[in-house]
Amino acid sequence: MEAVLKFRKIILGIIVSTLLVPIEAQTSKGDINCEELWDQLSFNSFYRNKEVVSRDSIPSIKVYKEPEFRNESYTENAKKYISYAKMINIKNMAIPNWENLSQEQKETYVSNLKQSFINKADSIQRAETADIIYFTIENNTPDTISIQMQDFTIITILEAKNASGAWQPVEYWSLSDCDHSFFIFKADAYTKNYFARRIIHSGNFHTKGRIATFVYHQIIYSDEFDLTIDECKLNIPQKVLESDYKWLGDVDVLNEYLKGFRNRVYMR
């Protein structure tokens, strides 16, 4: 038992020391060219729960930016520090003269240490989800609508306004050639359906962005939001334009492509 406690104390000491390392010092970014920037796909959208909206609403299907739900679930790296906080036990602290402290002093120390782990988890959470934006597909119609999914993610791309104020894609959706990749998510009448995806903010071109989503065989756009991108993202690489498996937001292209696949599962 003493050996186990000693091992736990060593591990805890290592964990505590990591609290002193700033998150910024743990990551670094190198320079990348424009084509590489285009290949940094960020399609990690996912659907969440749903809630009922008013039946008095004017029938419409719309996508709009939601308030942040950042702390609803921690990332894997942040969860580690939540686990560390739960591991702390007042009986096995590797602190000099621990036995000579009063019960109140021990409880205060343990409480502060646990809070430091929680603060570290929150710091990591903010850093790792800084680029995640939440959206809602709101079905105000009396009918169930079909939301196209691929590999359990909602098909979306990011568009931005160029210097002339025209909308254009600044990323592509990589289409699958596998029949089993495509699914339909059924959004019930009068419901909100939440999803989230990563929006990479980089560069020095400040503009407006929006999400294009494929819903009910048509493209539905989100409301506008502030966006910072690298200007080279406004120049679509030739290899993207020539590819048969990259979608840039044209509704006819996507409808035609999906004709070759049978939408196998209706997801709830």
Image: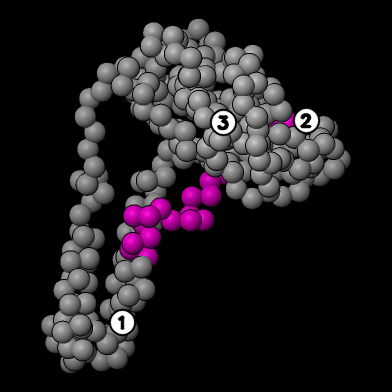
The magenta region covers 61-82
Residue that carries the numbered disc 2 in the rendered image: 60
**Kind of residue at badge 3:** Asp
Residue visible at 69% across and 22% down in the picture: 218
Query: Where is 10 relative to 43, above or below?
Result: below
Residue that carries the numbered disc 1 in the rendered image: 89
**Residues at discs 1 and 2 in contact (Cβ within 8 Å):** no
Q: Identify the secondary structure beneath mark 2.
A: loop
Residue visible at 55% across and 25% down in the picture: 210
**Disc 3 packing (10 Å; few <14; some 14–19; many ≥20):** some
Counting residues from the start of the chain, the first of labels 1 and 3 encountered is 1
Tell me if 20 is positioned left or right of 51 in this view.
left
Determine if the magenta segment contains residue 81. yes
Tell me if 43 is positioned left or right of 265 in this view.
left
- The image position of residue 225, as x and y in percent, is 54, 29
**Kind of residue at badge 1:** Asn
Residue visible at 78% across and 38% down in the picture: 144
In this view of the protein, which residue sits in the foreground, 126 or 137? 137
**Residues at discs 3 and 2 in contact (Cβ within 8 Å):** no
